[in-house]
Image (spheres, grey):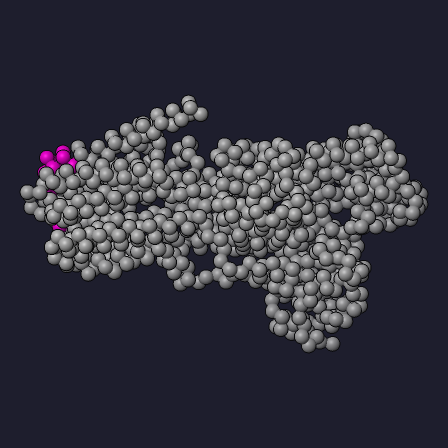
Amino acid sequence: MPLANPSSTPASSLASLSVTDVFDKLSASPEGLRADEAKRRLNLIGKNRLPRQKKPGLARRILEQLFSPLILILLAVAAIVPLLGHPTDAIVILLVLVFNTTVGVIQEGKASRALEALEKTLVETCTVRRDGTETRVPIEDVVVGDVLILEEGDRIPADGRFIEVSGLRVDEAALTGESTPVDKTAETLSEGTRTALGDIVNAGFAHTHVVAGRGVLLITATGSATEVGQIASALSGAQTEPPLAKKVKKLSRLIALVVMIFSAALFIVGILAGRPPLTLFATVMSLAVSIIPEGLPIVLTLVLARGVSHMAKKNAVVKKLNAVEGLGQVQVICTDKTGTLTTNHLTVQRAWGNGDWNESDPGLVRAAAFFGDNAKDPINAALLAFATRAGSSKDGWTRIEEKPFNYETRHRSIRAERGGERLACMAGSPEGVITACEVDETERKTIQTAISEAARQGLRVIALASRDGNLPLDNKTPWSFSGFVAMGDTLRPRVVESVAWCHAQGIRVVMITGDHPETALAIAKSAGIADKTSEVLNGTELETMDDAALAARLDGVRVFSRIAPTHKLRIINAYRALGLITAMTGDGVNDAPALHRADIGIAMGKSGTDVAREAAHLVLMDDNFATIIDAIKEGRATVANVRRVIMYLFSTSFAEAALITATLLAGFPLPLLPGQIIWINLVTDSFLDISLGLEPAHGTREQPTGALIDRRSVVRMFLLGGTMAVGTFAVYANALGDSTAHLQTITLTTLAAFQWMNAWNARSETRSLGELSPFSNKPLLAATGIVVTLQLIAVYAPPFQALLGTVPLSFADWGIVLGLSSTVILVDEIWKKARHKARGKKAVIA
């Protein structure tokens, strides 16, 4: 009978109903839905898809590129300069903005396509019963009431109630954070006794995986109504803004404020001095144009795009351009353990049996062989490899009874026979197995001491027992304790050196895991993350803390153990409340809120869910911690280049503003025309600042300050900008008796030459020019040649003379220009040497 309103129902609310009652509630049957009924329900309920943020269209993406304070300032300039009689300048600005927007849209489009290609690798079909026949259908066509057939290796596409199971084990780590697979049952659970998802053992959930056995699942919820879908729906609101976006906005507001203050002040001074208002307005606008670094947006975009391209080659897909700079500023990395720091490949490293560490104990080895029955389950695979290495096998044995892992008894048991011989074996947690065994107090203490020793070494313990196989699989008759195996997950290559690099660079690495505190600390020690118990904070203790107490404790914490997925968001919020730029890794659906909230959310590309990837800023294609470090290094190189470009542009802007202000206050003729200022800022500067953005990493990059402009760089900008302003004013003053055209041409050329020299200064904040090979940045060599050639064209080519109002210069003029402009290199070399001596003195004092 068709279900009138086939709405989704949480599987957790059906756990205490019998299978028959669940079928009745959903108007379904064990034979599955009729094809026409499935189609009807699909039309009513909708596709089995998770809610996602709607991908912006081309128009929206273009507007996002333009909606930046700095871009808006340039648009305002483009609107004003035609009023001053310079429409060509407006066209130049608009062309630059078009190019800037195009690059940004193309790069973010590439990241989107890379993620789409990744998503296509997911399982797209599943097996359901329709009209009494098993058939493959697209996962998105699964509906409430479908009967789903699950085999080992399948991904569960929607939530449901199990109606049949056979040795079924499901990895629910993506949803619950619990790394141990859960044994499932079709039995009805007692009402009101289970609240956590991991305890609802007769339910299956979307985005979890079958690691062993077989099962039949009655679908009760699809799409956004699933547990996964509800988490995805909660990720509403804007994603945390990357640091660069915040800094550019702050910088843009500062620029706008400076422009308004200077413009207003000079306009008032000019009016009081009796200057004509129209001429004065043109002069003030010239000043505004000189202050605004018109080339900055395009250079930022190109520098970030280059960083994105380099990261992609290193298995890191950046979804937004400005997240690149954020990686370079990261101060804390909160990283998962399993699969990120470690390989997620368990191996038996030690075995304890017969009262001692003895890997060859035959009873222990034979018991391990019985449970090594599924290579896809990490624990079973480790047991199988251990038994095989010891020469044991379950060949010839026939399984006659099995009891799956029970969350209450915490063990699994098997009974088998071979040639009339029968044997029963048990495996599970030490607590669960020891409880079922006949163990005296002395032996129990010995076992516990050995288990604690293994835990301190970061090993996971699986206990084993055996007994006469003629007895049924129950605990009425005591079992005989065989021993235990201690499994370890090996660190990924380069983890130790990557963590050491972070420490040397002042980046705090914090491990977050669900492991026991001793196990977590042992792994953290091997990775170089922590070395003492006081650096471990467990989830139970975290829950007793308020936000203030947690924030106060963070400075000394390097490991969070026994952490539930819900704790991650609190941890991220605590670090961000302290003003620390924080990266968070994650792969599960439950990690999505924390990834969404982090300054830099990092999702796993291989093991991660699409919900995690949707919430993140960065996706690791190889799930490797070392790749994060590669991305950070690239981000730091990008930050360094952004700082180089800003230092160059703002020292130039200061020189122009100081020159115009000095001549205005002195009552002298205008030193530069608005069009000439645009020529310097958009033509001369553009080639040089773009090439500075391509400067290779020097290998001795100082730790980021967290700001694009700090006190030290401001002092340097004023020093170099002042040198350029004084030198240019000297040339200007010397030519005051000449024609206006010659006066402005030699002033323009001097200022341009200063910029040629200053671009080479900007290559490093600390290193002398003599320490850097001129050929290590070949684009800068080429750019210098281009701008020199362009300036010669501007001075000597008649069409450009008409456009810019220039006249030819003599050899004597060029001698003055080049002689004075080279002083900016001398001043910067003195500055760097003085700074080097100051740092040396501080080191001696320290």
Q: Residue at x 74, y 71 (%)?
A: 25
Q: Residue at x 59, y 32 (%)?
A: 528
Q: Quadrant of the C terminus?
A: top left
Residue 758, horizontal then vertical, whole percent: 26, 37
Residue 124 visible in the displayed image: no
Residue 569 visible in the displayed image: yes
Tag count: 0
Horizontal placement of 695 versus 659: left or right?
Answer: right
Q: Residue at x 21, y 44 (%)?
A: 658
Residue 177, horizontal then vertical, whole percent: 66, 49
Q: Residue at x 78, y 42 (%)?
A: 429
> Does the magenta-highlighted stretch encompass residue 809?
yes
Residue placed farthest to the top in the image?
844
> Does the magenta-highlighted stretch encompass residue 135?
no
User: Residue 94: which quarter of the image?
Assistant: bottom left
Task: Write down the region rendered in magenta.
Answer: 805-817
127, above or below 261, in the image = below
Q: Quadrant of the N terminus?
A: bottom right
Residue 160, horizontal then vertical, whole percent: 71, 62
Horizontal placement of 438 versus 22: left or right?
Answer: right
Of 633 and 553, nearer the camera is 553
